[in-house]
Amino acid sequence: MAQLVIDIGNSFTKMAVFDEADLLGVGSYNKIIEQDIQDLFQAYHITKAIISTVKKEPQPWVELVEKHVKVSYFNSSMAYGITNHYATPQTLGLDRLAAVTGALYLYPGLDNLVIDAGTCITYDGVDAAGNYYGGSISPGLQMRFKALQYYTSALPLVNADAGFSNYYGNDTVTAMRSGVQNGILYEVEGFIQNYNKQAQSLNIILTGGDSEFLHTMLKNSIFAGYIKTEPQLVLEGLNAAIQEHND
């Protein structure tokens, strides 16, 4: 028996199958078709499912999942082990809540800082006792490059370059890379420093689509040895939630 975990994000949908705590398979989809759902249920003996979504519009393919198994929809009351002190819990993104749930589930007894590098970059801390007070949201890597091109008349659309490591650029393209990539690097290091002041032993977790790129940028940081990469952190959090809520 297995459980299906689905995270509907801004850019992609990720689906994973777990056997209790063991990850059996995971996939990322730009667009889900009926055959994708059929393939999952043919490949695994799935008995329950959980869905988290940041989108307001309904996804038609969800009905296909509901025809196979009972579906739970992740909400704040299902955040395993989390005491949520957010002033407006109804506005807290479920992906952020699932990520700190996953951090507490995978690294219990530690003060965790989750840095989710996706469409946006989010910073969320959860302490060893499971207290969550809030976090920060800033533009993501691609969003910053696109904004420079969109809001100016002369700047081009530039791609990120993991090989760029200078603190300045010597032409327009490298100057933009310096501004965006070093800007993110300094931002991340600043957040880590502030969280580190409040924690006895800070566990830093990178996740999200640009987490590997960000990890490369941080390889020379003084915090590099304390950073872990968990690409499936949100899915791990949703899996923790569905295991605790069997109704």
Image (cartoon, grey):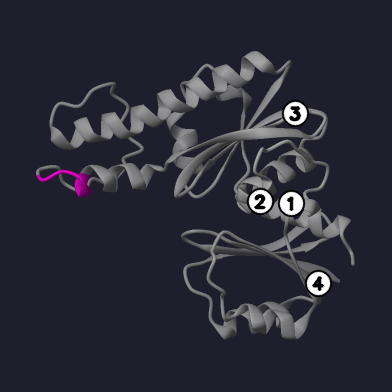
Q: Give the residue type that dot 3 points to.
A: Asp
Q: Nearer the viewer, mark 4 or mark 2?
A: 2
Q: Which residue is mark 3?
A: 127
Task: Identify the image quadrant of the N terminus.
Answer: bottom right
Mark 1 to mark 2: distance in Å? 8 Å
Mark 4 to mark 1: distance in Å? 19 Å
Element at label 2: helix
Q: Which residue is mark 4?
A: 48
Which of the numbered marks, if any, corresponds to residue 176? Answer: none
- Asked whether 237 falls inside the magenta stretch, the response is no
Q: Which residue is mark 1?
A: 76
* Residue at the (41%, 23%) spot, across then down: 186
In the rendered structure, which segment of residues is drawn in magenta? 149-153
Lateral position of residue 118 relative to residue 149, left or right: right
Task: Locate residue 106, reporting x and y percent.
Answer: 77, 41
- Which residue is at the front of the view, 82 or 196? 82
Sort mark 1 into few (<14), some (14-19) or many (20+) by Cα contacts within 10 Å: some
Rendered view: 112 above or below 121: above
Rendered view: 161 above or below 192: below
Element at label 1: helix
Q: Nearer the viewer, mark 4 or mark 1?
A: 1
Residue 232 can be seen, yes or no: no
Element at label 4: strand
Q: Which residue is mark 2?
A: 90
Task: Identify the image quadrant of the C terminus.
Answer: bottom right
